[in-house]
Amino acid sequence: ALKGRRAIVTGSNSGIGLGVAEALAAAGAEVILNSFTDRPEDHALAAELAARHGVPVRYIAADMSKGAECRALVEKAGGCDILVNNAGIQFVAPVEEFPVEKWDAILAINLTSAFHTAAAALPGMKAKGWGRIVNIASAHGLTASPFKSAYIAAKHGVVGLTKTVALEVAGQGITCNAICPGYVLTPLIESQIPEQMKVHGMDRETVIREVMLQRQPSRQFATVEQIGGTAVYLCSPAADQVTGTTISIDGGWTAL
Ligand code: NAD
């Protein structure tokens, strides 16, 4: 259904980004994978995805903490019809101890990159009269938790940017939406488990159920396939009038 569409997915050599890239490739889109590394395995991942889905897949290295590289990514791809802003990092500390360089990096990668890539991608989308921007925000784009100030500020910012871009291009065949996942078991989340086990003095299963999924009423992780499926839906004609909004995939978190 997405044959002939070119999709850029930032931060897509792992986790949700890779899951979204898989889903878009399976739907027939040409896919550009990205991260800040430029290793043989990054390019091998692109080749493997291309072979499995029979679509063109390229890996383009670009550091989403740097505005010029964000814009260069779109240029090197040759523009895109579908832009998925997914690159993101996390750091947890009380505000007064939050390292300034971590704050700056989280705002740059999780929020400002989406401004740069959208700015670079929109002229081409406008020329074609079709475009889809899908921002991977978070339940933390709609609600807060302590000790995640930079991440939550950035993700709320992504939701605001999503609405603004949607208004600027409304009626031009271009939509801009944010997906707000609750907890999805990816390397980002996996890496938080040992620290949470230490902090709470719990074993792995207990920390997952009682701490991490405490706010997710389903007590189940969302999956990268579910996020990918939602991105494909947002690129489908059924979603032509869905714009400037958020779709939560959070097991009921934001209903609480
Ligand atoms: P992940 O760590 O598995 O993936 C993050 C991706 O971003 C990786 O591909 C990484 O290489 C890339 N990346 C990091 N810094 C980058 C940079 N400077 N330039 C380019 N790429 C960079 O994490 P994930 O869980 O898959 O997270 C993906 C997105 O989903 C993030 O924006 C995250 O905030 C969001 N999210 C995740 C969850 C969850 O539970 N996992 C929940 C809500 C939102």
Image (cartoon, rainbow, N blue to C red):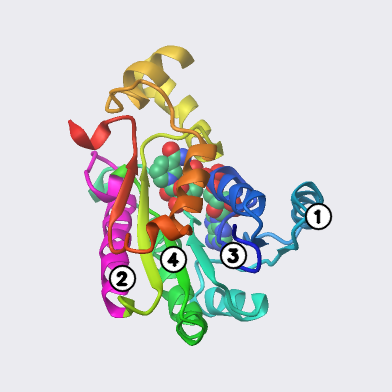
Instruction: Write the residue at 46% across / 35% down.
Output: 184
Residue 203 in sight here: no
Counting from the top left corner in percent of width and height, residue 16 is at 53, 45
Q: Residues within 10 Å of mark 2 (few under 14, many from 20)?
A: many
- Disc 1 marks which residue? 47
Mark 1 / mark 3, whichever is N-terminal: 3
| Measured Cα–Cα span from mark 1 to mark 3 | 16 Å
Which stretch is magenta? Answer: 140-168
What's under tag 4, amino acid-wise? Ile
Closer to the observer: label 1 or label 3? 3
| Measured Cα–Cα span from mark 4 to mark 1 | 25 Å
Mark 2 / mark 4, whichever is N-terminal: 4
Instruction: Write the residue at 44% across / 60% down.
Output: 237
Residue 162 shown in magenta: yes
- Mark 1 beta carbon near ligand 1 (under 8 Å): no
Residue 166 numbered tag: 2
Asked if disc 1 and disc 3 are in contact, CB closer than 8 Å, the reply is no
Residue 211 in sight here: yes
Counting from the top left corner in percent of width and height, residue 120 is at 49, 81
Residue 62 figure quarter: bottom right
| Measured Cα–Cα span from mark 2 to mark 1 | 33 Å
Q: Nearer the viewer, residue 231 or 220?
A: 231
Q: For this view, does 226 lie left or right of residue 73?
A: left
| Measured Cα–Cα span from mark 3 to mark 2 | 18 Å
Q: From this view, report whether residue 251 is shown above or below residue 245.
A: above
Q: From this view, report whether residue 223 is shown above or below residue 232.
A: above
What secondary structure is marked by label 1?
helix
What's under tag 2, amino acid-wise? Ala
